Amino acid sequence: MTTPKNDKNTRTTGRPTLNEVARSAGVSPITASRALRGIPSVAEELAQRVRDAARELGYVANPAARALASARSQTVAVVVPSLGNQLFVETLEAIHAVMRPKGLEVLIGNSHYSRDEEEDLIRNYLAYQPRGLLLTGFERTESARRMLDSSGIPCVYMMDLDSGAGLHCVGFSQLRAGAAAAEHLIARGRQRMAFVGAQLDQRTLLRGEGFRRALQQAGLYDPALELLTPRSSSVGLGCELFNQLLASHPQIDAIFFGNDDLAHGALLEAMRRGVKVPEQVAVLGFNDLPASSFMVPRLSSIRTPREAIGRRAAELLLALMAGQSIAEPVQDIGFELMVREST
Amino acid sequence: MTTPKNDKNTRTTGRPTLNEVARSAGVSPITASRALRGIPSVAEELAQRVRDAARELGYVANPAARALASARSQTVAVVVPSLGNQLFVETLEAIHAVMRPKGLEVLIGNSHYSRDEEEDLIRNYLAYQPRGLLLTGFERTESARRMLDSSGIPCVYMMDLDSGAGLHCVGFSQLRAGAAAAEHLIARGRQRMAFVGAQLDQRTLLRGEGFRRALQQAGLYDPALELLTPRSSSVGLGCELFNQLLASHPQIDAIFFGNDDLAHGALLEAMRRGVKVPEQVAVLGFNDLPASSFMVPRLSSIRTPREAIGRRAAELLLALMAGQSIAEPVQDIGFELMVREST
DNA sequence: GGCCTGTGGGACAGCGCTATCCTATGAGTC
DNA sequence: GACTCATAGGATAGCGCTGTCCCACAGGCC
């Protein structure tokens, strides 16, 4: 009477809605919803009509409305500690390859190897009601752990197994991989073996621990030959640490690097300084990044199965999301020692 | 105490809602909403009470409900062609660094250098009603272009400028960068210069084009010395192409690689085969990845300002999202020739 | 025929928030 | 004191979709 209530709908998105698709197909919105979601209780002829109408209008479902109405999204969140490390990029690729065909969106979070950043990411992602979560390792804040527990959202842990009791995890034993590195160098007759680790995330520390124990067992452990730094791993840092190590301990005859980046730097620096690899010093890397087999000399490394980890973790998560019972909650994918010229 | 209440209604998320925060603070839901969004029309004393209640309950706003009600999300989508290239990872970092403090979520899409995949990603992301979009380059399908146009969502294009008329873009001229590469090698007295490009995305092609034109101008262009392949750039491919080029054209005295990965492979292969760089062949890379300055010999390269591109593109997008008028829609960040030992 | 069952499809009522009104209050004006 | 006017806060009504009931109807059985 006094105030016209017919306001222009500025709140709408302007994109076609399910209602319009339904009207255009001559069915009710619910039937349209069911048809587009592939729910079988819709007669094929009707479903086809709805799909045609949707294509015609360029309809794409509004994920916010969908998430709100159903209290679940079509999203899976992944948190990795770094995108600079090719390792995690390849893992993400494999996850994508499994999730995308299922119509699941993959949210990528980068924690920069920081527990606090990871906690923020998890808090943030949980608000999106993801169908599942893929996390790296077991190292996180207590409150992140609590949020995960109380959320009830399925979660798979990637990369490590060593302290994953009671959790669903896909990876390999970092401890055993470190030990394998030591055993290889010992088998090559090396006597004074160093470990160089950067970043100091839990996995690097575990590799160092495995390496150390194997050396101790062989009576070859020298604590002075461990070089650890919290700085982040890079080729340049590898150069620097190699020099530092050789300057302080010229007698060493093998180095195990916690990451291939570092080993690449060491090989380049050795080349530059005329240090003979492997004659004077053997160099062993970790992860076996794509470039490693092309280094001079070709780098021996422990190949980590990141493609398989990503894929299997994604598949495990899908099974959890579907409520299936899991026969093997802990999946050990193993690792492979790639022996090349540098050892 | 925060006791998760067990609704029988399965449609709820189980997490605390704005209503509960409001009740606990003794205000209406709308006041709570305003208080938490920092809308100034709420008395400070009330706002504080609401914030306290929210913290107490561990309340995190439901982004789906928020997006639905306001027809806008708190999200910005970025599409890059690859995560395997460090270049884009660094760009993403810079974007994050600008967006996160503003409370904006960054969705990362990887198009794998495929127009069709990019179109899918864009269609998908547009459904999320992002506040803005950051895309790489200008090469895309017609229907992707149409979707972007009709969405009305602000968009900034990164990396290239050469065909960005009328668009908001941040980057540098790939053409001029290619020309700069040629000029540098010419200034070094080289006579038979090759160009090696992989992936064959538009930017690589433009760099090649700039290189070619500059050689033509100097009367030094030989079409036989262009080696192009659609395979994706890697160190291994660099080795292979280097060998191939030297086998077919042993007389060349300089190679410009469209990406540092390839140049790294070439340097390693040269080392392995005893080809002297730069005496016999000068090698020039592109992007100046972190490892380049540690190669043997240290790789000369054209440094691309990806950190600045990411940051400036993000800032430009923020300005567009805020409806500000843009003084400079095309921002040329330039590039820098890093002359090192390999040339 | 009466009764059941199964099946396709629709009506309805929200999911958790926010845009848009609208009211109550109190200060300021003449 | 009667009138404005600004302002804090509330009431209401959706945003676009889906979970849950419910109904109409065909076919089978006794």
Image (cartoon, coloured by chain):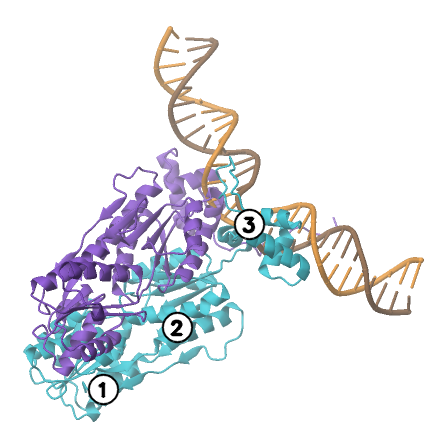
Chain colours: A purple, B cyan, C brown, D orange
Residue at 51% from the left image edge and 53% from the top image edge: B60
Could you tell me which quadrant the C terminus of chain A lies in? bottom left
Residue type at the position of mark 3 = Leu
Q: Can residue B262 be seen in this view?
A: no
Reading the image, the residue beneath label 2 is B310
Amino acid type of the residue tagged 1 in the rendering: Arg
Residue at left offset 44%, top offset 51%? A126
Front residue of B313/B48: it is B48
Q: Position of residue B48 (x, y in %)?
A: 63, 58
Q: Nearer the viewer, residue A54 or A172?
A: A172
Going by the image, does B225 lie left or right of C19?
Answer: left
Check disc 3 and report its element: helix, strand or loop: helix
Residue at disc 2, secondary structure: helix
- Label 1 sits on residue: B340
Q: Are marks 3 and 2 on the same chain?
A: yes
Q: What element carries label 1?
A: loop
Q: Can residue A256 be seen in this view?
A: yes
- Farthest residue in the front direction? A219
Q: Residue A25 or B292: which is nearer the viewer?
A: B292
